[in-house]
Amino acid sequence: MNLKQKILVTGGLGYIGSHTAVALQEAGYEVVIIDDLSNSELFVLDRITQITGIEPEFHQIDLKDADLVNEFFQNNKVDGVIHFAAHKAVGESVQKPLMYHKNNLLGLLNVLEAMKENEVDHFIFSSSCTVYGQADKMPIDESAPIKKAESPYAKTKQIGEEILEDFVAAFEKNVISLRYFNPVGAHPSALIGELPKGVPNNLVPFVTQTAAGMREFLSVFGSDYPTRDGTAIRDYIYVCDLADAHVKALTRLIQKQNKSNLEVFNLGTGIGSTVLEVVKAFETVNNLKLNYKLVERRAGDIIEAFADNSLAENELGWKPETSLEESMRTAWEWQRSLP
Ligand code: UFG
């Protein structure tokens, strides 16, 4: 008889999803993955299996298809859902707002509907620090106002959280929304990591691809910000630390330790790093020099964002354990493992 709790991980072949699938299996959960492979690769399934020795069940399903989603829930008794599946490129969302709203919100609605129909009670939502817009105060805690979203992507996360408010109020479900800062790094095995399609938008994949000779130089966007070295500040959180927070949040719901039906936690290190500090950490730990140029600011970038993570520490018992250097070491190991 199988007594393991079975957890659905949507987007489980993606960057954070795959690391969380590993962490869930290591914590003793049974994992079933749904992914549409729109921004992920099937080989990640084998990699998860290589790391943990357990092959997760996998279903290629587009969550926009309500019938398929409901059919999945009818055929699979799951104890909880961690919902990663979403489009996530901020810049692209400005060009393709309808695609973002359709994919991110329809997918969410179909999963929630199926949870309601099939009596699944626990839900973890991938939210983002972008819900705060340009926050007035640093560090940002969870009581900071939800300001106007800077992009359609951010708006889908704001609306997602609002939908969840109504969902828990009407159906007595339990939800935790996790607001990520900037996830970086790769699994220490170098078997899974971030797999950007095309030219990376995000800093760390661009750094590693530059070091690998795939890009001529890194453009550091803006060197005239009012910060200690003129470059913008972010909170870079190691992806495996992030994955652990999901396991803790899920376990909190399953063990009924949550204090309200909808809880929200920031997931960041609490430390702000400038772009040049990230470059330096990468160079130091990997003992190499990175080719970079200081260029104009990137449109839409904010000056700084870093988390007050004390709520997650106090309530989830979660503390990020990995330094920026160690994250940069794993990011480079992962890059070097790629063909
Ligand atoms: N940066 C560069 N050069 C680059 C890429 C980035 O200097 O080639 C700088 C950016 O200007 C910024 C910092 O590095 O100051 C981080 O940029 P990222 O693009 O990596 O990440 P963002 O802070 O823009 O993060 C946003 C949202 C996240 C979201 C992420 C995903 O805040 O919630 O985009 O795309 F997850």
Image: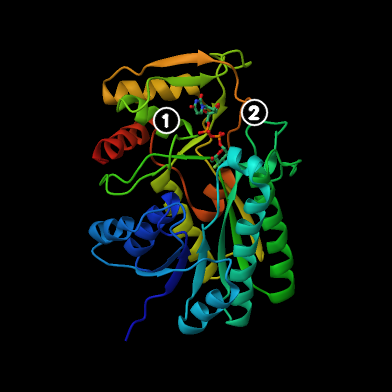
Q: Secondary structure at mark 1?
A: helix
Q: Which residue is mark 1?
A: 206
Q: Is residue 145 left or right of residue 195?
A: right
Determine whether 113 is above or below 200 in the image: below
Where is mark 2, residue-wise? 302
Q: Residues within 10 Å of mark 2 (few under 14, many from 20)?
A: some
Q: Quadrant of residue 20?
A: bottom left
Q: Nearer the viewer, residue 193 or 122?
A: 193
206 sits left or right of 163 in the view: left
- The residues bearing labels 1 and 2 have C-alpha atoms spaced at a distance of 19 Å
Is any atom of residue 141 visible in this view?
no
Whether residue 198 is situated above or below residue 27 in the rendered picture: above
Q: Amino acid at mark 2?
A: Ile
Q: Nearer the viewer, residue 132 or 72?
A: 72
Q: Quadrant of residue 230?
A: top right
Near-viewer residue (274 or 318): 274
Q: Looking at the image, is mark 1 or mark 2 earlier in the sequence? A: 1
Q: Find residue 315 and report its image quarter.
A: bottom right
- Give the residue at the far bottom of this rendering: 1
Numbered badge on residue 251? none
Horizontal and vertical percent for residue 117?
62, 81
Residue 56 in the image: state x and y as whole percent.
33, 68
Task: Name which residue lies at 37% across and 57% down.
Answer: 23
- Is the residue at mark 1 in contact range of ligand 1, meaning its CB lies under 8 Å from it? yes
Q: Label 2 CB, ligand 1: below 8 Å?
A: yes
**SS of the residue at dot 2?**
loop
Which quadrant: the N terminus?
Answer: bottom left
Please name the amino acid that badge 1 sits on.
Answer: Phe
Position of 19 with respect to 67 (left or right) is: left
| Residue located 38% across and 53% down the image | 19
